[in-house]
Image: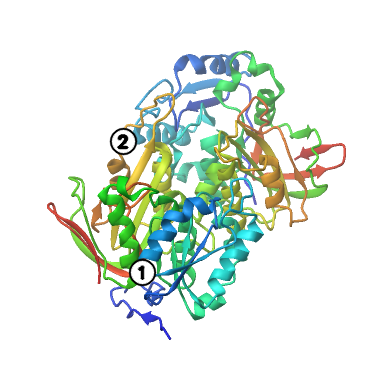
Amino acid sequence: MIKIPPYLQKGDTIGLVCPAGLMPVEKVSECIRVLNEDWGLTTKVGTTIGQQYHYFSGTDEERLEDFQHMLDDENVKAILCARGGYGLSRIIDKIDFTNFKKNPKWIIGFSDVTILHSHIYRNYSISTLHAPMANAFNEDGFKNEFVQSLRHALEGKKNKYHCKPHEFNKKGEGIGELVGGNLSLLAHLVGTDSDLKVKGRILFIEDVGEYLYNIDRMMYQLKRSGKLDKLAGLIVGGFTDMKDTERPFGQTVHEIIRDAVAEYAYPVCFDFPVSHEKENYALKIGVGYKLKVGKNKVTLEE
Amino acid sequence: MLTASYLPALPELSTGEVGTLFISPAFLKTGDIIGITAPAGYITSAEIQSAVQKMESWGYKLKIGETIDKRDFTFGGTDEERAKDFQQMLDDPKVKAIMCARGGYGVVRIIDKLNWDKFKAKSKWIIGFSDVTVIHSHLNKNFGIASIHSKMCNSFPDDWSLAEPIQIETIESIQLALSGEKMKYSATPNPQNKPGTADGVLIGGNLKMLETLAGTRSDINTAGKILFVEDTGEYMYSIDRMFWNLKRTGKLSRLKGLIIGGFKIKVDEDSDDFGRTLQDVVLEKIKAWHYPVCFDFPVGHQKNNYALKCGVKHRLSISPENVTLKEI
């Protein structure tokens, strides 16, 4: 049974960390202001915010220590990863989840943070939040429905999302725990201790900046590793800034994914607002959802 | 009739690993037929001419598959056409070796469509690298049948008079491997090599392919073996992530030895500085183990890419002065 961390109350503390790529302080300041002033939360800013070690927000040890500190601090009720990038693969096996298991708290983020979602769901059955990160708050982004959906999720409101129908959608209804994230990372995790559990679940995937042939190859990996045949449903999010090779691949990303799951009967929807773009609803990993894909309407609700 | 020669069981695989028996297909003799097929990217008959002539000069006959000159966007024909062509090469008893004309992308799309029954009953050499790593790994995992990791038709120069000696030598190494010569290689020592000697079955290929085979029925089995990896056009962060994948899927813990071939590293557009060299990235993953490791081995997407026999027992010897790999 999935464990749901306590929802946040006014005045609760949310910790901000960078477990992967570096993030300048000025890009996090609007997020901190909104969390404090609008959402009524207290923020605890980790040492990795604004810190740099080459590509990363700190050495492995520094990133680990900051994240571990937030996990272990009883006053911190949620941890918002300020950005993704690359770096969680390097520290995931060093994180000590002992206190977190006893006192779960919301862990929030997407992209590279997919590793945390998949790892925690697989090993501890604790729900996490796949949701916008600090940069999404900038340039008035905090007002949009996607950042607001994170606020609602943290406050304990049940999600109900709609999206436009797509010609490749496969109609039907699926009920199951929601799992997923960034396709490249889900593929990268296959066979590891953080590998995704998908049987009987609703899977969502999104990606950015990948070559079409590589998307195809990753879909084949998921398929060949038994990740696609027993789903309750598939949610295809944004696949943005796709690249093609000099010799064109010959299929769009939608066609690639459509073909990869053509033989299965479960419902499939495309262009769901979960992506590296603004369109990125907060989704609770591990929580039961119902996906309804109809002719004119697609809904996903808790 | 040619018979497959069986390598003896490897007693040092005391860790209880499978695949103790590797089958080496029959070596080629003058007049034997090599089939050429395109299981991944497309290629024209003009582009394979140099390879055809060279292999004929080695005394072999060629059978040109239907996928040569076929094109379906990036592929050498549709999945069905590529699978059918490869299948008939597998099933034709006269074909003693199959040379993949080039890599690209596409083998994983057809690998599960292939029927290996005849191949298993009477194995033959399958030749190629890069995307063809899927086949090497699949044979390693499922059948324990040896194969040749080497240059393909698209690496044979059009004008041999302009070819560098290393190009000629590496292409000639394919013929040595096919004819049953015991292979021996040397590499320039890298100061960050970890010295030692190891005996084990050689396996490996393109790192990205090995990562994307994880969890599938073609997933490589590395325990008790000497693993080689190479890659091209990947960012350093991606190479780092792939080595974490090898480590986290348990592929680095029980090796006999590790061979790092060529890595052409892509530079980040926004000149992000990863802060670690390839050597750092590799060595930090394996510091818990004491097997020998060498860098700069002549295998990869480069001119010095020698034919290596996957699934055949080798000895890797690394000292500060010398690096050698030899078939034993």
Q: Position of residue A153 (x, y in %)?
A: 68, 31
Q: Is residue B156 above or below residue A292?
A: below
Q: Residue at x 60, y 56 (%)?
A: B109
Residue B46 bears which disc, if any?
A: none
Q: Residue at x 68, y 31 (%)?
A: A281
Q: Viewer-proximal residue, B238 or A192?
A: B238
Residue B276 bears which disc, if any?
A: 2
> Is A105 left, or right, of A59 in this rendering?
right
| Quadrant occupied by the C terminus of chain A | top right
Q: CA distance from mark 2 to mark 1?
A: 39 Å
Look at the image and tell me whether residue B129 can be seen: no
Q: Residues within 10 Å of mark 2 (few under 14, many from 20)?
A: some
Furthest residue to the bottom?
Answer: B1
Q: Which amino acid lies under the numbered mark 2 shown in the image of this protein?
A: Arg
Q: Residues within 10 Å of mark 1 (few under 14, many from 20)?
A: many
Q: What residue is shown with label 1?
A: B178
- Which comes sooner in the sequence, label 2 or label 1? 1
Q: Viewer-proximal residue, A256 or A89?
A: A256
Q: Position of residue B128 (x, y in %)?
A: 43, 59
> Is A96 left, or right, of A181 in this rendering?
left
Between disc 2 and disc 1, the foreground one is: 1
Q: Position of residue B314 (x, y in %)?
A: 27, 67
Q: Which amino acid lies under the numbered mark 1 shown in the image of this protein?
A: Leu
Q: Residue at x 50, y 51 (%)?
A: B46
